[in-house]
Amino acid sequence: MKTIIELKKTAHLLSILIISVLSGTSQNKSDTIIINPTTVNTKVLRPSNNRYLVYFRMGKDSARSRPQFWTRNIKDTTYNGKAAIMVTQEWEDRDTIVHRVKSMCDKKTFAPLYHKTWWRINQAGEFDFINKTGSLSNVALSDADTARNRKGPWNAFKIACNQYVLNWHLDLDVFPILPYKEGKTFLIPFYDPGSPAPKLESYTVSGSAVLDGYNDQKITCWLLTHESKGNKEIFWISKKTKEVLKLEQEFGKDRWRYKIKLGFSI
């Protein structure tokens, strides 16, 4: 039978253990942040015209293949009387434009207001988050439509209209507005209009690195890592300007996709 002193010692040790566990839990929580309207800083998005070279390597020693050039223009504007940021995109594949996008986002929170897409070999889409209307291939979406290829996107869009989301099609413009800190994990409520319902995607500030730029520049960057089954993405984000300078994505075994921001182009 334990003495009173022994019982007190046991209780004291249990108290220390509980405090340690709670402290560890609190620390883990402090390293994770759910992105919301109060945690983004859209002031870093300056009006600009940006171009990216996108290409693949389909083997460890293979040549670069399937090159594309992505042009992204950012400008301040208004939409339905609201201060907004407009992002337009144009993707070129060798000698053909394959994709065009026009997106309007709230000036302060970057929440989507409007999104219109066109694909050369696929359907077009248009989604108005203020009026809560949408269409695919010029067919209006509604509760009465039972076609599977439209019903799913419509239900997902209705969910997105009733919560804070960020447009996943604008990920290169979303990453600059995040509150970077070493070891921080962001849970981003991403939604790509016309796709499945919004969900929290985990991106972790996994470290820092230096990119060599023009004129012997040494550009210090945050490394932002995103992983899912069979896929790993590492983004290089300039610590000074917050712009995305590089993506290295490994999908499958020995297969990579790259996005490289061009310093200038004509």
Image (cartoon, grey):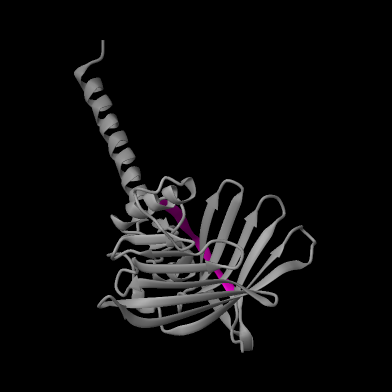
In this rendering, does residue 217 appear at all?
yes
Per the image, is 23 magenta? Answer: no
Q: Tell me residue 249's x, y (percent).
A: 61, 60
Number of marks in the rendered image: 0
Q: Tell me residue 39's x, y (percent).
A: 31, 64
In this rendered view, identify the residue nearer to me: 152 or 66.
152
Quadrant in the picture for residue 47: bottom left
User: In the image, 86: left or right of 169?
Assistant: left
Q: As displayed, is residue 64 above or below residue 16?
A: below
- Dominant secondary structure (helix, strand or loop) of the stretch shown in magenta: strand
Q: Residue at x 22, y 25 (%)?
A: 8
In this rendered view, identify the residue nearer to me: 191 or 43.
191
Q: Residue at x 55, y 76 (%)?
A: 90
In this rendered view, identify the residue nearer to me: 243 or 209.
243
User: In the image, 214: left or right of 7?
Assistant: right
In this rendered view, identify the residue nearer to me: 81 or 240.
81
Quadrant in the picture for residue 70: bottom right
Region of the chain picked out in magenta, as a range: 199-210
Q: Residue at x 74, y 67 (%)?
A: 65
The C terminus sits in image quarter? bottom right
The N terminus sits in image quarter? top left
